[in-house]
Amino acid sequence: MKALVLSGGRGTRLRPITFTRAKQLVPVANKPILFYAIEAIRDAGITDIGVVVGDTAPDVMAALGDGSYWGVSITYIQQDAPLGLAHAVKVAEEYLDGEDFVMYLGDMLIADGIAHFVEGFGQAQCDAQILLGHVALENSIEFGMVELDASGNVIRLLEKPESPPSDLALVGVYLFNANVMKAINSIEPSPRGELEITDAIQWLVDNGYCVRPHIVEGWWKDTGKLDDILEANRIVLDTLEPERLSEPGTGADLRGRVSVGSDTVIENSLIRGPVSIGNGCEIRDAYIGPYTAIGDKCRVVGSEVEHSILLAESCVEGIGARMTDSLLGVNAAVHRTPMLQDSVRVMIGDNSEVNLGQ
């Protein structure tokens, strides 16, 4: 069995961060989201992985390399335009070469991995198996939604409907055999100009092929928006196994699960875990609150940060207020100006500087 990881798309809901990087490379708990996908696939026993890339191909290729770091082999497949998930499968047809495969959206996080999902596909001998999760009905516009009959069989799929047939959403992991290519070659682009994977699966259902649903019991996250990224960061940090590669300095008080990288200086600061701090950081006269991930070579000085993600080389200095629910890009800086409010929330892109206040 092969795997197909989708790592194209423009990530418009995460701008300005995604103006300068692939959305799949935004870190959660100081590790790019895409790495979790590769690890989940490897842990399911699949080592032949195709990665579909788009405009951000150079960044994705630089991050993943040939896959040897994870003990897998990666083949890159170019998708010239983001024309839908089914289109991504179509451009990978030569790579897939008629084999069964798991398709995994590169910006998804799933708590329990996919090993049992892959094993179930082999036992069921179906043409497709789809992973489903419950969502709030008001969020259905963000997902492909699925209707099951009383016996649990798939009967209808709709892409981002305003009136969903149920609260079951496609999670973003699918298993297919070669018959999915028949379906993709039989459908037309949707009104938004894309070949929808929901239409391809519906074609399989309508033409008598076996499509088996599997409902996720644990948590899962589509990390396409700021709030989702922060929530995923919180969930993953809750499982943090602390590692201390630097010793706290004078006046440092580390409480709870706090992971600290090498060559990091922490002085006169209170850190309340779960928190992950990268290599070469400087934390002075600061408070770092729970569910914060600080990337390599960051500076937090005379400031308070909580429930936030700081990418590498970013700086929060002297803001005199608590920064919460925020995402800072690489080499971004937040400073204080007069009349700053008691708390702030920001999302700023790479190489940006913001002075907060009036």
Image (cartoon, grey):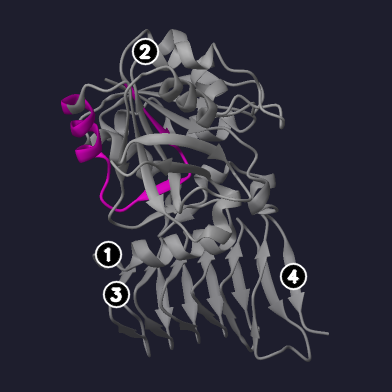
Looking at the image, is mark 2 or mark 3 earlier in the sequence?
Answer: 2
User: Is 177 rendered above or below residue 196?
Assistant: above
Question: In terms of depth relative to the viewer, which is nearer, 4 or 336?
Answer: 4
- Cα separation, mark 3 vs mark 1, equals 22 Å
Q: How far is mark 2 from mark 3, CA to CA?
A: 54 Å
Q: Crowding at label 3, few (<14), some or many (≥20) Cα neighbours within 10 Å?
A: some
Query: Relative to 293, does residue 184 appear above or below in the rendering?
Result: above
Quarter of the rendering occupied by the N terminus: top left
Q: Dot 1 lies on which element? A: loop
Q: Which one is in front in this view, the residue at disc 1 or the one at disc 2?
A: 2
The numbered mark, 3 or 1, whose residue comes first in the sequence reads 1
Question: Of the residues tagged 4 and 2, which is closer to the observer?
Answer: 2
Q: From the image, tell me which residue sits under label 3.
A: 247
Identified at 65% across, 39% down, the residue is 10
Amino acid type of the residue that numbered disc 1 sits on in the rendered structure: Thr
Quadrant of the rendered image containing residue 272: bottom left
According to the image, label 1 marks what residue?
239
Residue under label 4, please give it: 354
In this figure, which residue is indicated by the disc labeled 2?
Answer: 178
Sequence-first tag of 4 and 2: 2
- Give coordinates of residue 305: x percent, y percent: 53, 78
Tag 2, which secondary structure? Answer: loop
Relative side of 34 to 358, left or right = left
Q: Position of residue 40 (x, y in %)?
A: 29, 40
Residue type marked 2: Ala
